[in-house]
Image (cartoon, helix red, strand yellow):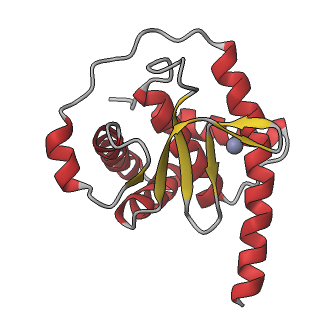
Amino acid sequence: MIRGATKRAMLVLAFCSAACARHRAADVAAHPVPPPAPLPSPAAASAAHPAITTEAQTIAPELASAIGARVADLKARGGVCEEYGEVLESALATGRITLRPYMWRVDGNLASAQGESTGEMTIARDIDSLNVGVRRLDDVLRSAEHEAAHIALRIASGDPVREARVDERVNGCRSALPR
Ligand SMILES: [Zn+2]
């Protein structure tokens, strides 16, 4: 059933890329972003996560390290958070996360992230060559979580209601835990 599965993956991808692109591009454009936070040391993380695929080598260790930390937190939370945390963990471990230096065009829309039902995801580091540092590491991380949630919860993109549902899940899994 490879052909059928591939076709379905392509369908999900097509939906997601256009809608996420619009959604995320609008999101990035609409909110002024504070200066980037200091990043953790890349050296140690690089050795721990050699599997990450990237066209922007300089950020890969920081992103891999940040994803690793989020995965641990998501798994500790259980439920839906754990479900998409496992998708992220698997994508990281099997080298299915591609980091592109800048956002790219999909059907006329700017995309900051794109996920496939196979677990592959592509994420933009920066908006474009003039906006380096505007998109913070946490924005990149949030994009990865957003795509993982789409994949894990099988929520195809395509309308604002579904996008809002995905964002709501991700926000819920990022909120402070009660003590
Ligand atoms: Zn989306």
Specify whether residue 145 is in view.
Answer: no
**Quarter assignment of residue 19:** top right
| Residue with the most extreme bottom position | 1
At which x and y percent is residue 124? 54, 38
Q: Which quadrant, please, contains the N terminus?
A: bottom right
The quadrant of the rendered image in which ligand 1 is seen is top right
The residue at the point 74 percent across, 32 percent down is 23
The residue at the point 63 percent across, 13 percent down is 31
Q: Nearer the viewer, residue 172 or 119?
A: 119
At which x and y percent is residue 4? 77, 83
Q: Quick check: 44 left or right of 177? A: left
Q: Is residue 96 above or below residue 159?
A: below
The residue at the point 45 percent across, 61 percent down is 91
Q: Quick check: 118 left or right of 35? A: right
At which x and y percent is residue 130? 54, 18
At which x and y percent is residue 60? 34, 44
Q: Nearer the viewer, residue 75 or 146?
A: 146
Q: Is residue 163 above or below residue 179?
A: below
| Residue with the most extreme left position | 44
**Quarter assignment of residue 43:** top left
